[in-house]
Image (cartoon, grey):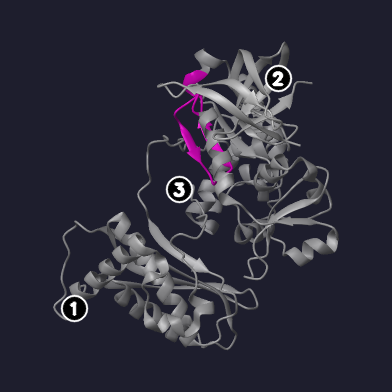
Amino acid sequence: MKQYVDVIAYHDQYDRVTPLYIVWDTGIKYSVDKVLKIERAASLKYGGVGLRYTVRIHGQMRWLYYENPKWFIEKIE
Amino acid sequence: MDRIILHCDLNNFYASVECFKEPTLRNQPVVVAGNEELRHGIVLAKNQMAKQAGIKTGQTIWEAKQRIEDLIVLPPDFKEYQRYSKMVKEIFRDYTDRIEDFGIDESWLDVSGSRRLFGDGMQIATTIQKRILHETGLSSSIGISFNKIFAKLGSDYQKPMGLTYISKENYKEIVWPLPVSDLLYVGSAHLKRFSYMGIQTIGDLANYDHQKLKRSLGKWGEYLWLFANGRDTSEVARQTYTFPVKSIGNGITPPRDIKTIEEFRLISYVLCESVVARMREQHVFAKCVTIGFKTKEFISFTRRESVSVPLTSVHQLMEHVMSLCERNYAFDVPLRYISIHVSSLVSRDAPQQLSLFEDAGNIEEEKLDIVMEEIRQRFGTFSIRRCSLNCDMELTNFDPLKDHTIHPVNFFR
């Protein structure tokens, strides 16, 4: 299943988007420690295309997809 | 220096997009097909599993279901397909500005000038194929060659995820043994002729006396002979170049067959309105009208006529359409499909020879058309229409201007 998540992001004047926090459906906010990579990529497993952010959250690596305007998350295998 | 031309073909495009978006579909036979109730129920695309079961594009849904009972039939989502197609074309744009689309899922790319930056044809093709899969999740086949025709053959040679290089050295081994029907623009009429002449493969065609071919098939004989010998010199058009329009037309398969000339008139009105609106968009007048008929028994034919005074209004176009129809079809067999095309287009700015004996385009009628179009643009297609069209809403309730149509593309534009 594709897990859509709420995201608090920083949109700059050059159209760049940086995710700052992921808000889980329980209401807990997780801060994005670092964005390691931004690339165009498809989620082959769940079916989705857009910008893929490789991020570190609480020491764990995750793929966060920006489907404009929605975000979803996938576990790095 | 030889050119390097790639032809990229997205495998089973519509079905691939659907399967990519919904992973649970990937292990099941899936087809994308038109609406059965509106009688557009034919297979537009199928995935690999459906293909293996022998389902072909163009089959009706019930034919396909005879092969696989629990076949999954999905309606097409053209907006989504266009979105994916656009993403793929953005990838192409990183490598060249010479990109010519051939339908929504195929393109030619001339990368001759990108060799220094990105490596030879094979390297560029490999990169593009990988990027398409990585960035959009779609599989593609790419043909690499020194002309457009062989590049296209190359992309059809191995599917899915094929990469085929057809060079001046190896084309005789790869291309020539293929059946002649694989060559672009060889149609059923050509095939019949070829079988009389003993031409079975592309190699047979290439080695045939080209004067004889020209005599029996006309200029097409010569073109096909050149194609078979790898001497196609047509260029990949630049992306920014727009082709001048040569004809404008719309057609429809209505929800039920057309049995009388009155019904024909109603549908023609809707089609003509769309054709004239598009003529105005292109800033042209037309001097030739063609009607395409397809009977219930799937027999197709066209009838055309040239007009001395350029057509400018729906009313004028309708007069010609109706007289053509009256003279050529008696409605013994109901019609399944009709189309109306105009060609021999002349610019609106071109000077016109007026006739002494016929009225020039009626200005009042044209003004009426323009007002109707403006109202439609502001308030929607169905906000204003001819009263007669309301006699049969079932037949006339369609919008050829906005409804999806993929127009066939011509190589010799």
Mark 1–mark 2 distance (CA, rounded to whole Å): 73 Å
Q: Are marks 2 and 3 on the same chain?
A: no
Q: Chain of mark 2?
A: A
Q: Residue B130 or B369: which is nearer the viewer?
A: B369
B104 in magenta? yes
Closer to the camera: disc 1 or disc 3?
Answer: 1
The percent position of residue B68, horizontal first and vertical second, equals 85, 58
The residue that disc 2 covers is A62
Amino acid type of the residue that numbered disc 3 sits on in the rendered structure: Phe
Q: Quadrant of the N terminus of chain A?
A: top right
Q: Quadrant of residue B294?
A: bottom right
Amino acid type of the residue that numbered disc 2 sits on in the rendered structure: Arg
Mark number for residue B412? Answer: 3
Residue at horizontal 44%, vertical 24%? A15
Q: Are marks 1 and 2 on the same chain?
A: no
Q: Quadrant of residue B310?
A: bottom left
The residue that disc 1 covers is B359
Q: Residues within 10 Å of mark 3 (few under 14, many from 20)?
A: few
**Magenta range:** B93-114
Q: Residue B167 or B383: which is nearer the viewer?
A: B383
